[in-house]
Structures are given as structure tokens and as C-alpha cells.
């Protein structure tokens, strides 16, 4: 890890100790750290993509069923910036439909990788799907995305347990998970404005099960319904990770936490058609 990451984790360690959390529990937690990239509308880092903007697609690509949230230039990301096995080049397009009525029921987004050198053309705006989430009808945010790198720690306190409240029980390996998350959320930071966290851990409002693992479970149900392509290999919910978390700032949905997830096997095979997007919202 780079020195600045070690400095962040060292400060976190000291703050957690000051809260009375046992050193062994802190060490097990920091062992879970993942590198991530923040792509935000603030700062002075290099431009690596944009929120919104023109929809550039290959001529033979089908119309997306939801709106373009972001386009990322993968070649502009430095090696090791995230924990993800992303393609080295090309563009990653993320699409979103943050519909509160479909939380926990259907996929709320999609993703598309366009390999480098693929001819693209702007898809006319009138072919872009209508934004249909009244009363939250609004344009998605736009702006250039500038890169900064950071480190991510988990936002989960529980593991899946059918039949239990919230279908979860406290994580047996991390009895102080909630306190550790609270320490982490109080760490100083400048913020990135609107944008994306690429890689790392997703966050939802519950701090219960890992949101990406929960997304993997939802995705398996979508496969069974014929709504998502089946994987090429055996994939467990525990194999799913955060592709990106969206800091959207949408009017009326400011507190909604939205992320795209993918299994590591699908990512390695470039099966971005199996990306599954989820959201939690506490109005």
C-alpha cells in the first residue's frame, strides 16, 4: 500500500484504540482494507470520465433501458488504483434507474464496457429512455470526474441468516464492527462532491450485510426469473464486490445509497451484462 494509505489506516487504528476497541479486532478489520478510486466533481486530479453527458455507443449496441449515469475512461486509471480486475482500456458506461418502488425487487441499473478503438456515435437524446420515477423525475447529475485514490473499509456488521430479523446475525469474526464503522465515518476527509467510488466497499443505510453480497443474492433470483444472464461458472453471493458507489445528490433522493455490484468471476470474464445495481433509501 502507498504511504498515504498506511497513514490513513494508522490514524484509524489510533482513533479506534481511543474508543476502547481491542487491538486484535482493529487489526482484523484493517486487514480487510481495499484500495479504491474516488472520481469526483471537486479537486484538481486528472480527468478520468464524466457524470452524464452525451451517450456514445457503438452503432449496433441496443438502446439502454435506463439513463447514463457516468462514463469512465479506464485507460486513465493508474494500475492498482482499485481492488478490481478492470479492463486496462476502453470505456465503462454505468446506467441507473434509482426507482424507490423497485428496491429489493429488480435490478436498478446496468453497465457496458466498450473496448478501446470501437467506433461509437452519439445516440440521439430522444432515444434515451424516459425518466419515469415521478415524483423524483429529474435529470441525472453532470460534470467532469477527477481522480483521487483512497482506501475503503467495510460497512457491514452482519452475515446472512434466513429467518432472523433483517435476515442477518452479528458477524462472528467482527464483534466490534459497528463501533469500527462509526470511527471510520468520523475520519477527516475533504469529500469529492458528486461522483463515484470505484471499487472498495459499498455502503447502505442498514450497515447490516455487505451490500454487494446482498446484491449477489438478488442477482441469483433475477437469473432464476430469466431477467439476468446466468453466470458461466459457479458464483456465490460472497463472490460479489462493489463495482461503483454513486454519490448522486438527486433531489428528493439525497439520502439514497446506490451502488453497482459484480462478481469477481464475471468481472474477470468481462461479463458486464451481469452487473446488478441496488439502492437503500430512508426518506
Image (cartoon, grey):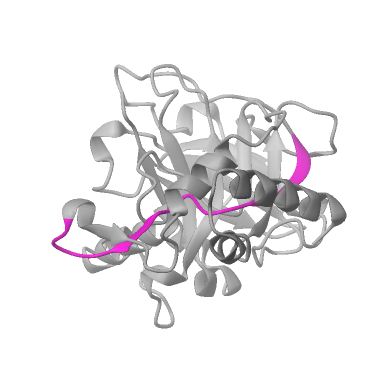
Horizontal and vertical percent position of residue 167: 21, 57
Magenta range: 146-164
Residue at the image position 30 percent from the left and 16 percent from the top: 135
In the rendered image, the quadrant that contains the C terminus is top left
Q: Nearer the viewer, residue 19 or 187?
A: 19
Magenta span includes 154: yes
Does residue 252 belong to the magenta stretch?
no
Give the residue at x 71% y 52%.
9
**Residue 271 shows in the view:** yes
* Whether residue 224 is situated above or below residue 134 in the rendered picture: below
Query: Residue 124: image x %, image y %?
Result: 55, 31
Q: Nearer the viewer, residue 126 or 81?
A: 81
Q: Nearer the viewer, residue 128 or 24?
A: 24
Query: Residue drawn 35% across and 43% down?
Result: 206
Rendered position, 39 above or below 79: above
Q: Residue furthest bottom?
A: 233
Q: Quadrant of the N terminus?
A: bottom right
Q: Residue furthest left?
A: 163
Residue 57 in view: no
Residue 172 image offset from top left, x and y in percent: 37, 68
Residue beneath the point at 43% across and 53% down: 156
Q: How many marks?
A: 0
Q: Is residue 139 left or right of residue 116?
A: left
- Identify the image quadrant of residue 88: bottom right
Which one is nearer the viewer's eye here, 178 or 159? 178
Q: Is residue 222 left or right of residue 33?
A: left
Residue 2 as seen in the image, left or right of residue 107: right
Residue 54 lies in quadrant: top right
Q: Position of residue 56 (x, y in %)?
A: 64, 41
Amino acid at each position: 500500500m502507498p504511504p498515504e494509505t498506511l497513514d490513513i489506516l494508522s490514524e484509524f487504528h489510533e482513533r479506534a484504540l481511543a474508543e476502547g476497541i481491542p487491538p486484535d479486532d482493529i487489526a482484523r478489520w484493517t486487514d480487510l482494507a481495499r484500495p479504491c478510486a474516488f472520481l469526483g466533481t471537486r479537486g484538481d486530479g486528472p480527468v478520468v470520465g464524466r457524470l452524464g453527458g452525451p451517450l456514445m455507443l457503438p452503432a449496433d449496441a441496443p438502446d439502454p433501458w435506463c439513463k447514463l449515469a457516468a462514463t469512465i475512461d479506464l485507460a486513465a486509471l493508474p494500475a492498482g488504483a482499485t481492488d478490481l480486475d478492470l479492463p486496462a482500456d476502453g470505456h465503462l458506461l454505468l446506467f441507473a434507474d434509482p426507482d424507490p418502488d423497485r428496491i429489493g425487487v429488480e435490478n436498478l441499473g446496468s453497465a457496458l464496457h466498450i473496448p478501446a478503438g470501437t467506433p461509437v456515435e452519439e445516440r440521439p437524446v430522444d432515444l434515451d429512455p424516459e425518466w419515469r420515477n415521478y415524483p423524483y423525475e429529474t435529470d441525472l447529475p453532470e460534470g467532469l470526474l477527477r481522480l483521487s485514490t483512497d482506501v475503503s473499509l467495510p460497512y457491514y456488521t452482519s452475515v446472512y441468516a434466513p429467518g432472523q430479523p433483517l435476515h442477518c446475525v452479528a458477524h462472528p469474526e467482527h464483534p466490534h464492527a459497528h463501533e469500527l464503522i462509526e470511527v471510520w465515518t468520523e475520519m477527516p476527509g475533504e469529500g469529492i462532491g458528486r461522483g463515484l467510488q470505484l471499487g472498495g466497499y459499498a455502503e447502505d443505510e442498514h450497515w447490516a450485510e455487505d451490500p454487494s453480497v446482498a446484491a449477489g443474492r438478488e442477482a441469483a433470483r433475477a437469473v432464476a426469473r430469466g431477467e439476468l444472464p446466468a453466470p458461466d461458472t459457479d458464483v456465490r453471493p460472497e463472490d460479489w464486490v462493489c463495482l461503483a458507489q454513486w454519490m448522486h445528490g438527486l433531489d428528493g433522493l439525497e439520502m439514497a445509497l446506490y451502488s453497482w455490484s459484480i462478481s469477481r468471476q464475471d468481472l474477470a470474464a468481462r461479463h458486464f451484462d451481469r452487473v446488478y445495481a441496488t439502492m437503500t433509501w430512508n426518506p
